[in-house]
Amino acid sequence: MSESENLSIKLFKPHRHARETSTLVGSSSNHPGGLHNAIDGDSDNSWYRILRRPQWIWQGLDPIEMEATLARIAVSDNERTSEKLLDTVVGYRPGNWSYEWTQEGMRFQRQAKTLEEQGDKKAAADAWLKASTHFSIAAYPHLKGDTLSQQAEVLANKAFHAAMEKSSYKIKSVVTKVDGKSLEGFLYLPHTDSPLPTVIVSCGLDCLQTDMWRLFEDYFLPANIAMLTIDMPSVGRSHHWSLSEDTSRLHQAMLSELSSVPWVDHHRVGCMGIRFGANAAVRMAFVEQNRIKSCVSIGGVLHAMLSESERLNNIPPMYLDTIASRMGRMEASASMLTQLRALSLRNQGLLVGRKTKVPILAMSLSDDPVCPESDNCLAATYSQGGKSKIVPSKPIHDGYHRIMQEAVTWFTETL
């Protein structure tokens, strides 16, 4: 048995009866599901988690293996906290979400070790990254207090660091201090020969920054652009801080730290965000317009989702729980929905009045329930040289690819 599998046994053994994810905040018992779009995936009444199939396939999961894993969860006879929700099997055992995805991660980990022994460093790095991705999905949606999720994150980080050591490109850890606590991001570099244009990237509230390696490999690396990843507040390496209306606070601290990093061209720094990460990115384009040169928002949670009662009332249970967890709350209440309005960039006085000099490309896929065209238009209107774009969402697995191509083209032209 390998050292990593020993670690897995040590981590999970005491938590066979850990609290099941959907019960930690508990919105699933009193809120309807139902969300279908290419950025988030599918939410329905049979699953607590939103199944992010398009993103997971884009991150390198084999669609057939993914469906087989979901099927094992669905057909399990083990006890569930809710018989209506397939992914609520209690404890670390067959059918439990963390268990099944961790088993898949272990399979890629064994593959990585075999490839290492054979001397194939590149293939080993790829296998380690796939192991990290599977462990990260095992931890999804990364709620605070979810013991099994925390253990899976330990494995995801270990696999990611193993990949860093063997990667054909450079990945550097960048650390800064916020409130006396360490904040870590990862800087992906095409080379270290000269300073590079750099884009600070964040995803939504239910992803880890280590999930974003594919974005660099497929898009930024060929364009010779460096990428710095940072977790959103209260998740992953940003777990010390709660989500507040100052969504870009950690990004601003990391931007200041970049001024001492020799591989970064400080006159050519951009920012890009997906979903809540786009809220932080667009905020940066306003509050740091003397240090940020370009910005891209993808399906951004900028205004409508945070202000319109109908949209707020239709947030799927897992999303509600995730937002509550990020805000440091143990339940999703009406007062939380009121607090969300303060996160609207329009309500903060940014997407109204004076334009930022930073050009913003605001994109979403067609029929996006989270980011309507009006949000993209707001971001584009209040930026000099800004642009709003709706990308067709079909074929579904191609939507991600086209959006990322557009983003990199934008940075190539504006950085």
Image (cartoon, rainbow, N blue to C red):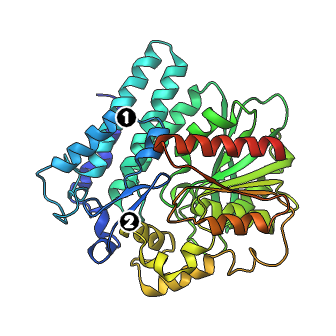
- Examine the image and state in which quarter residue 401 appears: top right
Q: Classify 259 as above or below 8.
A: below
**Residue at x 82% of width, y 43% of height:** 413
Q: Classify 374 as above or below 272.
A: below
Percent position of residue 185, x then y: 64, 49
Could you tell me if residue 180 is visible in this image?
Answer: no
Q: CA distance from mark 2 to mark 1?
A: 30 Å
Left or right position of 55 against 303: left
**Residue at x 79% of width, y 53% of height:** 294
Within 10 Å of disc 2 (Cα), the crowding (few <14, some 14-19, many 20+) is many
Left or right position of 80 against 87: left
Within 10 Å of disc 1 (Cα), the crowding (few <14, some 14-19, many 20+) is some
Q: Classify 220 as above or below 24.
A: above
**Residue at x 43% of width, y 79% of height:** 313
Image quarter of the N terminus: top left
Give the residue at mark 1.
Answer: 4
**Residue at x 84% of width, y 67% of height:** 356
Which three-letter amino acid code belongs to the residue tagged 1? Ser
Q: Which is closer to the viewer, label 2 or label 1?
A: 2
Give the residue at mark 2.
Answer: 318
Of residues 319 and 15, the one nearer the viewer is 319
Could you tell me if residue 302 is visible in this image?
Answer: yes
